[in-house]
């Protein structure tokens, strides 16, 4: 029975170790909220989730699509998702920390060169067309105009019958929503003086708007409106981004623009809750950037992905839009090893393991002492019987002592079958039993009774020696 219980305990221990290994090595599945569901960001995240599954990596993504980027950001704030695609100027979750900038969108304002609009203040009393791609584009433009004390006006219903838009009042800008296909006609008909779009400078939409403005401009020459006050604007609107459009971004000969243009924009970011595992976030960030070229075949927007700008680790986690420590670990090449990850638990186990082991050893000693007490009681009783035998005066008393001795021996044999007894204790028991029987034999001779045969006198000691396994 003792061996069977030992095997059961060993099996349970091995099962516990195996379960712990399986638990620690299982892939970490993160729920990622994506919006809008038909946007390029959704295609990128879907492609990334599929690549993680095929590679059987230690982190996996479960993609949940939402109708708008506001909804995906709200899912992150409500803890319905671990990761989310977020556009900070639309809605910035309070618990969101950045993993990667999926792509930047810049405010690109272009106008025919003859109109002579070089900066935002020059838009006063002008008509600005905007190609609206997202519901947040108009609030974005309104905030920017308010920074320059310009008031946006919508074109009124009392516009002139000749199709020309009414001229704006001083300090006002008439904002005219447009579609890309209407840009050239709006310029030719003098309904707008300049056109704006919030898009990635390298995107097809931005290029199409610039070409449309060029077609509606005299001599097909266009200029770009610069916003050099990016740092000051970010102080008031920290959810925006400072963006530089490099010279020649839109191609052409001569190149368009002919020099870099400073502007502001918004960013689409992959964010995570601050409570998400640092190790899981580091792994997700690592694979996202290392597989960029692989993902670009399914989602071209992956080519525009970049890491957030920061100088130090402290700056990264305390920026206007803080970064997740797990992502910073990857960017700084300080990803945690297994020992780094579980060193606290290992230290605690080592620290308390000795104490717990000592406690179990003390309990074991107490139990062993309890087990020995029964054998010690038998030994003490046998020694007392030896003294009682010397005082016995009749065969009846000697018979009673012999019966008690046999009962004690039988009790020890039964006990020894359930518990182990060391050889020294068994030897002491045999000597005590032999001593008792010798004393009884001497007492019988003194009372004149016949002495029992030697085999009978020693039968109990031999029985004890044979039945106790520790005596072999």
Image (cartoon, rainbow, N blue to C red):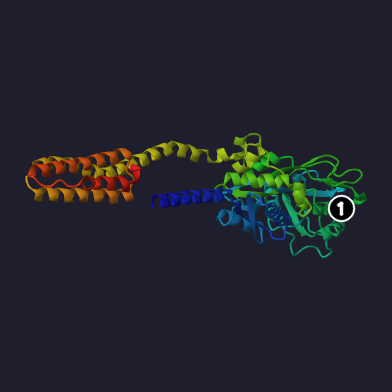
* Badge 1: residue crowd in 10 Å (few <14, some 14–19, many ≥20): some
**Residue 33 location, quadrant:** bottom right
Residue, disc 1:
211
**Residue 116 in view of the camera:** no
Residue at the spot x=81%, y=55% of the render?
Answer: 192
Residue that lies at the very extreme toward the top in this rendered image: 312
Residue that lies at the very extreme toward the left in this rendered image: 393
Is 414 on the left or on the right of 394, as rendered?
right
Q: Position of residue 57 (x, y in %)?
A: 66, 50
Is residue 177 positioned above or below 331 on the image?
below
Is 426 on the left or on the right of 249, as rendered?
left
Q: Position of residue 409 (x, y in %)?
A: 24, 48
**Nearer to us in this view, 263 or 285:** 285
Is 90 on the left or on the right of 190, as rendered?
left
Residue at the spot x=71%, y=45% of the render?
Answer: 289
| SS state under label 1 | helix
Q: Position of residue 95 (x, y in %)?
A: 56, 49
**Residue 205 in view of the camera:** yes
């Amino acid at each position: 029975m003792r061996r069977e219980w030992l095997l059961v305990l060993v099996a349970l221990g091995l099962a516990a170790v195996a379960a712990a290994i399986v638990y620690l090595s299982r892939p970490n599945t993160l729920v990622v909220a994506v919006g809008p569901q038909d946007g390029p960001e959704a295609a990128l995240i879907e492609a990334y989730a599929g690549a993680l599954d095929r590679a059987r990596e230690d982190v996996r993504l479960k993609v949940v699509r939402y109708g708008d980027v506001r909804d995906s950001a709200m899912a992150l704030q409500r803890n319905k998702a671990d990761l989310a695609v977020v556009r900070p100027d639309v809605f910035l979750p309070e618990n969101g920390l950045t993993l990667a900038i999926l792509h930047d969108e810049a405010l690109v304002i272009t106008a025919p060169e003859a109109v002579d609009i070089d900066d935002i203040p020059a838009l006063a009393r002008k008509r600005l067309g905007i190609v609206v791609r997202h519901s947040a584009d108009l609030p974005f433009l309104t905030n920017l105009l308010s920074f320059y004390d310009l008031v946006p006006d919508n074109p009124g219903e009392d516009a002139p019958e000749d199709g020309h838009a009414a001229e704006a009042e001083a300090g006002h800008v008439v904002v005219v929503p447009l579609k890309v296909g209407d840009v050239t006609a709006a310029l030719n008909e003098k309904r707008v003086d300049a056109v704006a779009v919030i898009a990635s400078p390298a995107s097809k939409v931005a290029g199409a708007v610039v070409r449309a403005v060029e077609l509606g401009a005299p001599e097909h020459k266009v200029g770009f409106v610069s916003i050099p006050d990016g740092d000051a604007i970010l102080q008031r609107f920290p959810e925006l981004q400072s963006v530089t459009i490099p010279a020649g971004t839109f191609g052409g000969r001569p190149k368009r623009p002919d020099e870099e243009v400073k502007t502001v924009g918004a960013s689409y970011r992959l964010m995570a809750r601050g409570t998400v595992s640092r190790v899981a976030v580091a792994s997700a960030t690592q694979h996202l950037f290392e597989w960029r070229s692989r993902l670009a075949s399914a989602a071209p927007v992956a080519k525009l992905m970049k890491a957030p700008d920061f100088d130090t680790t402290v700056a990264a986690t305390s920026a206007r839009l803080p970064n997740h420590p797990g992502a910073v670990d990857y960017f700084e090449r300080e990803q945690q090893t297994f020992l780094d990850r579980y060193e606290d638990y290992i230290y605690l186990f080592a620290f308390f393991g000795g104490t717990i082991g000592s406690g179990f050893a003390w309990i074991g000693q107490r139990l062993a002492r309890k087990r020995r007490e029964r054998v010690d009681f038998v030994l003490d009783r046998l020694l007392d019987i030896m003294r009682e035998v010397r005082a016995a005066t009749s065969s009846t008393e000697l018979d009673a002592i012999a019966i008690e001795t046999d009962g004690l021996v039988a009790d020890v044999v039964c006990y020894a079958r359930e518990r182990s007894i060391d050889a020294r204790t068994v030897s002491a028991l045999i000597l005590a039993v032999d001593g008792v029987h010798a004393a009884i034999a001497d007492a019988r001779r003194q009372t004149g009774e016949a002495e029992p045969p030697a085999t009978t006198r020693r039968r109990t000691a031999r029985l004890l020696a044979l039945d106790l396994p520790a005596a072999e």
